[in-house]
Image (tube, rainbow, N blue to C red):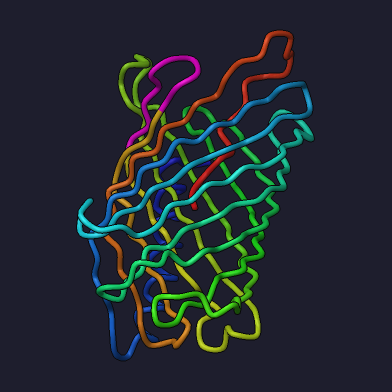
């Protein structure tokens, strides 16, 4: 695979879907500046079984205002060293956007995913397909109504990590794009839900700890079809991959991930 072609394709894929959303956005685009921090753990306990867990905080207006808090866990099964399946549960607390409101809307989420990773020379390629069932609490007048909005969201992530120098102290280059589509009785105008483009670096701190940091452009269409969020986001994710004695399979790629 031509590395330059790969990175060009990832970016074109993201901008294509983002442009489609912008064409449809005839009225309102809300630009926001955010910070997004997370800790992600992937633990392969046996040659076949393990677990993942991650915690996220996203803030608006830099770090001034809240956006959401998210916790997720899952049971992982390695079909082979490159192919992994996961099922799990996540819970989100969404900060109210209406001035003066205090109640954090709750979201319960089940998910299933399959992920494939491969190495092509200096390029590590990762593809992930995730399906989510989401129960989002409906809030009115700063209180839950007792009703939930249900949607099913399908996400496809394509990510490439390029080693640019043999010295491991030199960070790697990361380019990724994720497309999110969702369905449900409340989804009428926005089957396209959002697109996320990420450009940054990945650095290995130790055999078990690494992080990536960079810029994410997140473009999200609202349920009404004409309102959009264009989020300019500073993203900083940490990854912890513990090594268990007696595990004989090759090292795993981190399979925890974004909200």
x then y, percent, for residue 182: 59, 73
Q: Nearer the viewer, residue 103 or 249?
A: 103
Residue in the picture at 43% in, 79% down: 222
x then y, percent, for residue 33: 23, 60
In the rendered view, does 174 fall on the left or right side of 215? right
Q: Identify the image quadrant of residue 34.
A: bottom left
What secondary structure predominates along the stretch shown in magenta? strand
User: Where 242 falls versus 149 (above or below)?
Assistant: above
In the rendered view, does 190 fall on the left or right side of 90? left
Q: How many marks?
A: 0
Residue in the picture at 51% in, 57% down: 92
Residue in the picture at 68% in, 50% down: 113
Q: Nearer the viewer, residue 134 or 160?
A: 134
In the rendered view, does 60 fall on the left or right side of 122? left
x then y, percent, for residue 100: 26, 73
User: Where 119 falls versus 146 (above or below)?
Assistant: above
Residue 128 part of the magenta segment: no
Q: Nearer the viewer, residue 63 or 25?
A: 63
User: Where 18 falls versus 234 (above or below)?
Assistant: below
Residue 204 part of the magenta segment: yes
Report the magenta residues as a range.
201-210
Residue in the picture at 39% in, 86% down: 24
x then y, percent, for residue 195: 44, 64
In the rendered view, does 65 fall on the left or right side of 235? left
């Amino acid at each position: 695979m031509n590395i330059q072609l790969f990175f060009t394709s990832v970016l074109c894929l993201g901008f294509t879907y983002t442009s489609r959303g912008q064409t449809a956005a005839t009225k309102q685009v809300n630009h926001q500046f955010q910070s997004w921090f997370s800790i992600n753990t992937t633990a392969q306990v046996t040659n076949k079984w393990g677990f993942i867990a991650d915690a996220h905080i996203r803030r608006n207006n830099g770090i001034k205002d809240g956006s959401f808090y998210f916790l997720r866990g899952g049971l992982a099964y390695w079909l082979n060293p490159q192919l992994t399946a996961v099922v799990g549960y996540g819970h989100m607390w969404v900060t109210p956007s209406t001035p003066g409101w205090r109640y954090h809307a709750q979201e319960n989420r089940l998910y299933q995913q399959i992920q494939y990773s491969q190495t092509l020379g200096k390029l590590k390629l990762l593809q992930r397909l995730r399906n989510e069932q989401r129960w989002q609490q409906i809030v009115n007048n700063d209180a839950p109504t007792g009703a939930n909005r249900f949607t099913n969201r399908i996400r496809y992530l394509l990510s490439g990590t390029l080693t640019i120098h043999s010295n491991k102290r030199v960070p790697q280059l990361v380019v990724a794009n994720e497309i999110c589509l969702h369905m449900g009785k409340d989804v009428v105008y926005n089957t396209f839900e959002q697109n996320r483009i990420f450009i940054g670096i990945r650095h290995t701190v130790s055999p078990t700890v690494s992080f990536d940091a960079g810029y994410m452009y997140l473009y999200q269409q609202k349920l009404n079809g004409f309102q959009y969020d264009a989020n300019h986001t500073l993203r900083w994710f940490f990854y912890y991959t513990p090594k268990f004695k007696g595990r004989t399979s090759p090292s795993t790629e981190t399979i925890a991930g974004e909200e």
